[in-house]
Amino acid sequence: MKKENYINVGINTASSLISLIPIVGSPIQAGITSYLNEKKASNIEAFNQELKAELEAIKERLPEKERISENLTEIIESVYDEIQRTNMQKKRAYFAKALANSFLRNENEKMDEEKLFIQILTLVPNEYLNIAIYFKNRSNNDVETKSNKDVEYAAISFFETYGIMKNSGIWFENGSNGDSMKNGEITPLGERFLIFILDVNQK
């Protein structure tokens, strides 16, 4: 990809769909995409394809361009700033759903919770996310975690810091392999966080 094509790579797909991303204007265009190397530009292109699909599904509920809040603008900037750095396909998918949900919550007064969720998603390793999702779904007998105990404990500790999980201090058997695992619990805030990154169309 030639350098002159980098400039708008972060906004063209969403812009052509619903003309939302351009409300960020110069911060995204000049501050991020105008000097992207090919790898970073490719990350944003891949993300835009995922975001386009999410926005298409909810386009009737999206806010008018003129009503986009400063808080939502800040979230858009944060997401695109992070997307250029990550090559992880799964994390891009989480960010696409998180950003789509942020559009739906544009009317929230401060969007403090949404900003917190974006911050957590930016910082959390994928391994930790897999463990949180495991705890959310562990009533399903087919779900087992493949992580070691140290990673499991570190994940619970990380999420405790943000109020996403709490540690009951009890160990339980992990599936058919007979290993034990620290009994972490997803908090109500954690349930909302996981909905935010896993399911669009939630109010």
Image: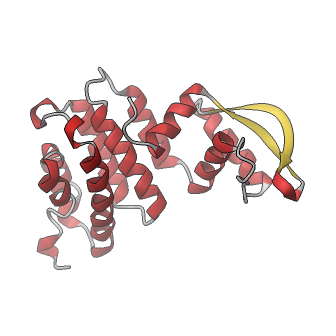
What residue do we see at 49% from left, 41% from top?
Answer: 120
Whole-percent x, y for residue 183 in the image? 78, 38
In front of the other: 61 or 47: 61
- On the picture, is 83 further left or further right than 90? left
Whole-percent x, y for residue 81 in the image? 32, 53
Whole-percent x, y for residue 61 in the image? 23, 35
- On the picture, is 68 further left or further right than 189? left
Of the 4 image quadrants, the one containing the C terminus is: top left
Q: Residue furthest right?
A: 178
What residue do we see at 27% from left, 65% from top?
Answer: 45
In front of the other: 138 or 156: 138
As drawn, 107 above or below 190 = above
What residue do we see at 52% from left, 40% from top?
Answer: 194
Residue 30 seen in the figure:
no
In front of the other: 50 or 74: 50
- On the picture, is 172 further left or further right than 162? right
What's the colour scheme? secondary structure
Residue 134 seen in the figure:
yes
